[in-house]
Amino acid sequence: MAKVSFTGPRVQAFKCPPDKKESFLWDASTPGLALRATIAGAKTYIFHAKLKARTVRMAIGSPETWAISDAQKAAREYQRLIDLGIDPREQRREQESERQAQRQQQEAQAVTFGEAWQQYMAARWDKWGEHHRNDHQRLTRAPGVTKAGKPTIAGPLYEFWGSRLADLTPEAIQQWAESQAQDRPTVARLSWRLLRAFMSWCAEQSEYRELITDNPAKTKGTREALGSGNAKRDTLEDNQLAEWFAAVQGSASPTMAAYIQAMLLTGARPGELLALKWDDINTRWRSITLRDKDESKGGKDGTRAIPLTPYVWHLLANLPRRSQWVFASASTTDNGVLLDAPISTPYKALRIANQIAGIEHVTFHGLRRSFSSLSEWLEIPAGVIAQIQGHKPSATAEKHYKVRPLRMLALHHERFEAWMLEQAGIVFDPQQQPGLRLVAGTKV
């Protein structure tokens, strides 16, 4: 095996003979260093040696990117390891693993809150209900403008969007909480709850767990900065029902009026009624199927059946059947096609009705609260009201031993509805069969 001193011209001129697949040119000054040339024209510096009767061959690099002196230096280092009884291939693998780990750490350090948040949403999306999904999107949205050209403010969590995840320290989150609590404390507390859950998820992920050892959102300082929300107290009293029902029926469109009244008479959540479809109404078994949310799991989808009481059915049956939605929108697209969507939550219609009735302030959730509060006039079992409203059982007996069929719920619910109509001065025959009518294009 002839050896020559490596020079630039010799390395450049060396080629593999046409009758061979590969050929080697060995360096006279560096043990184990050779230049390998293939019949295809490729050239590579290699190191070749023996370690405990085993052949060690390693590629060093191409002459186009490696200077001769660098290749010689690498070969001498490999030979030094051989002399120490160390396989240089193992050491190179370990070094590559260390470099890979460093690269991963650097990449993790560079991950922004927004990038991790999007991965979090993708991982948890199927386990959340629609309302919970909307919260995660709404509270991180960027500032923009509405279709009418009005500016919109950013969600509270958007402040972190471009920040590195590693920079979300307890101090940074507390400072954010103090700032947000000044202008919008209620939505800031909701944002904080979502942020805590997100940071806990990050701590469980292999690519983020080294960045987040203790949840930086779970600190006393942040909790104190946001404070605790006061319990809402808005509700309708029994002596307000007459003027309230009259105001709703007289000031709102038929679809909005039916929706607002049904909110009080069913105790449902606003989004549950808006999502109601005609297929969810079972006239044979007198039931309504609502798309529920399991509050203990942050909005996990589910359904529950509640009674279809006579007056509510009267309200719904006389609505125009424009689409699959019970409370269907009458809006159209630019080309005149009716939108297949429910109405938007009629906040303005409820506010006007409250003003006409002389009631200070009752929100849609206040109507749900009123359903629960007014039921005590009839001493209806709390478990019945909780089951109709979709609340979790509050006691062991309720959770494991009380199974109320729909007919039992209807017995209490219909009596409750009749009492509310009586307080409102509404004369209604529950035996009256409502007539469905087909109306197209009626303005809502």
Image (cartoon, rainbow, N blue to C red):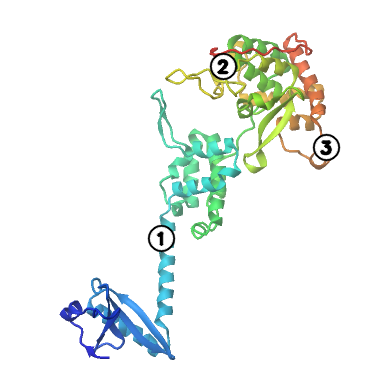
Task: Decide if residue 134 is on the left or right side of residue 62.
Answer: right
Of 190 and 207, nearer the camera is 207
Image spot of residue 407 (x, y percent): 81, 27
Label 2–label 3 contact, CB within 8 A: no
Which sits earlier in the primary sequence, circle 2 or circle 3? 2
Q: CA distance from mark 2 to mark 3?
A: 39 Å
Image quadrant for the C terminus? top right
Numbered badge on residue 359: none
Q: Is 197 placed above or below 419 here?
A: below
Q: Is 105 placed above or below 298 here?
A: below
- Can the viewer see residue 403? yes
Which quadrant of the figure has residue 15?
A: bottom left
Of 186 and 418, nearer the camera is 418
Label 2–label 1 contact, CB within 8 A: no
Amino acid type shown at disc 2: Ala
Amino acid type shown at disc 1: Gln
**Which residue has dot 2 on it?**
349
Image spot of residue 409 (x, y percent): 79, 27
- Can the viewer see residue 235? no
Which residue does the image show at 71% across and 30% down from the upper left? Answer: 389
Task: Decide if residue 340 is on the left or right side of residue 276.
Answer: left
**Which residue has dot 3 on it?**
402
SS for dot 1: helix
Which quadrant of the figure has residue 442?
A: top right
Which sits earlier in the primary sequence, circle 2 or circle 1? 1
Q: Is 356 placed above or below 195 here?
A: above
Image spot of residue 271 (x, y percent): 60, 29
SS for dot 2: helix
Amino acid type shown at disc 3: Lys
**Which residue has dot 1 on it?**
106
